[in-house]
């Protein structure tokens, strides 16, 4: 079933953009659609996919993902696949998890 994140699991608050809530969200690669890091409905599926890929279910990892997204990833990295690849790459380095073959 994979990781399921609730808004209360997050350390930061994100706006809920109700006008885009029903649009398809990130579910894996490839996905060249723009990523809205200021929309709860885009952020949660992204974090769930990253944590599923890394095979972790830990609140500290989730909070670190939030910090990376909000503090470290430049805004010019703006597609879903770019953000996903960046988050997975950085967290693999932090956790010492080798890249999948």
Image (cartoon, grey):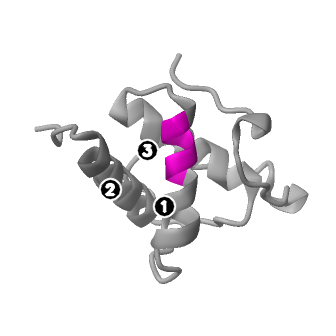
For residue 2, above or below residue 21: above
Determine whether label 2 and label 1 are within 8 Å by CB: yes
Considering the image in quadrants, where does the C terminus appear? top left
Label 1 to label 3: alpha-carbon separation: 19 Å
Q: Residue at x 65, y 44 (%)?
A: 44
SS assignment at label 3: loop
Residue, disc 1: 68
The front one of 64 and 5 is 64
For residue 72, above or below residue 14: below
Magenta segment boundaries in residue numbering: 60-65
Number of the label disc, if any, that sits on residue 90: 2
Query: Residue 59: image x %, image y %?
Result: 57, 32
Q: Residue at x 77, y 40 (%)?
A: 7
Residue 34 visible from this viewpoint: no
- Return the disc, 3 or 2, that comes first in the chain's sequence: 3
The front one of 41 and 25 is 41
Please identify the quarter of the rendering in which residue 100 is found.
top left
**Type of secondary structure dominating the magenta stretch:** helix
């Amino acid at each position: 079933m994979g990781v399921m994140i609730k808004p209360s699991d997050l350390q930061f608050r994100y706006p809920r953009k109700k006008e885009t809530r029903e649009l398809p969200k990130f579910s894996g690669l490839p996905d060249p659609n723009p990523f809205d890091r200021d929309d709860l409905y885009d952020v949660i599926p992204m974090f769930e996919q990253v944590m599923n890929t890394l095979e972790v279910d830990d609140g500290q990892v989730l909070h670190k993902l939030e910090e990376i997204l909000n503090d470290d990833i430049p805004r010019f990295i703006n597609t879903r696949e770019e953000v996903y690849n960046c988050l997975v790459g950085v967290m693999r380095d932090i956790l010492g998890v080798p890249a999948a073959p």
